[in-house]
Image (cartoon, rainbow, N blue to C red):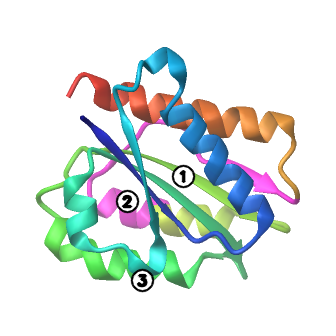
Amino acid sequence: MPTVLLVHHTVSPALDELVAAVVAGIEHPELEGSVRAALSPALSTTAADVLAADAYALITPVNIGYMSGALKHVFDTIYYPCLSATIRRPYALVAHGGSDLAGGIRSVETIASALQWTRIYPPLEVVGAPGRDDLTRAEELGSTLAAAVMDR
């Protein structure tokens, strides 16, 4: 069964809500249980986790204009072991913060681009508490990732 790996650094209830919405999208009943969501806290994610997955949902707080240190640690850990083996794998990003998220998004996209991953959903930018529209888009992001790996 194809797997979407959710690499997350959830340090707030807002991020927990966004992770749950992405999982709900991946495991949506209309997808008939054909894709599995695998939750992986950023500080314990390994290259083996990344290699075993078919797509990636990256979920991070943005503080001081950068992705979380935990997500950066994931990239530092997996970069060379996964560089050639994960080319063209789909990914999507959820970024949450209290204000401007541009630097955090840019930092994630720069590394994902270097890994040659394929972004299949625009970055989901959530400032403050997630509203109904944010959670709907997070669910859509999850469903889009699931659909991308169903045919693999």
Mark 1 lies on residue: 93
129 above or below 142?
below
102 above or below 56?
below
Residue 30, visible in the rendered structure = yes
- Closer to the camera, 123 or 54? 54
Give the distance between the C-alpha atoms of the residues marked 2 and 1, in whole angstroms: 10 Å
Q: Which amino acid does label 1 sit on?
A: Leu
Q: What residue type is labelled 3?
A: His
Mark 2 lies on residue: 112
Q: Which amino acid does label 2 sit on?
A: Ala
Give the distance between the C-alpha atoms of the residues marked 2 and 3, in whole angstroms: 14 Å
Residue 37 is left or right of residue 76, and the answer is right
- Give me the residue at 87% from left, 60% from top: 128
- Give me the residue at 20% from left, 28% from top: 152
- Asked whether the residues under the numbered discs 2 and 3 touch, taking CB atoms below 8 Å apart as contact, a structural biologist would say no
Mark 3 lies on residue: 73
Which residue range is magenta in the image? 109-128
Q: Residues within 10 Å of mark 1 (few under 14, many from 20)?
A: many
- Image x and y of residue 7, in percent: 46, 62
- Asked whether the residues under the numbered discs 2 and 1 touch, taking CB atoms below 8 Å apart as contact, a structural biologist would say yes
Which corner quadrant of the image does residue 3 belong to? top left
Dot 2 or dot 1, earlier in sequence? 1
What is the number of the mark on residue 125?
none
- Farthest residue, direction left: 84
- Image x and y of residue 89, in percent: 27, 45
Residue 122, visible in the rendered structure = no
Q: At numbered mark 1, what does the secondary structure look like: helix, strand or loop?
A: strand
Q: At numbered mark 2, what does the secondary structure look like: helix, strand or loop?
A: helix
Residue 25 is left or right of residue 111, and the answer is right
- Give me the residue at 29% from left, 74% from top: 46
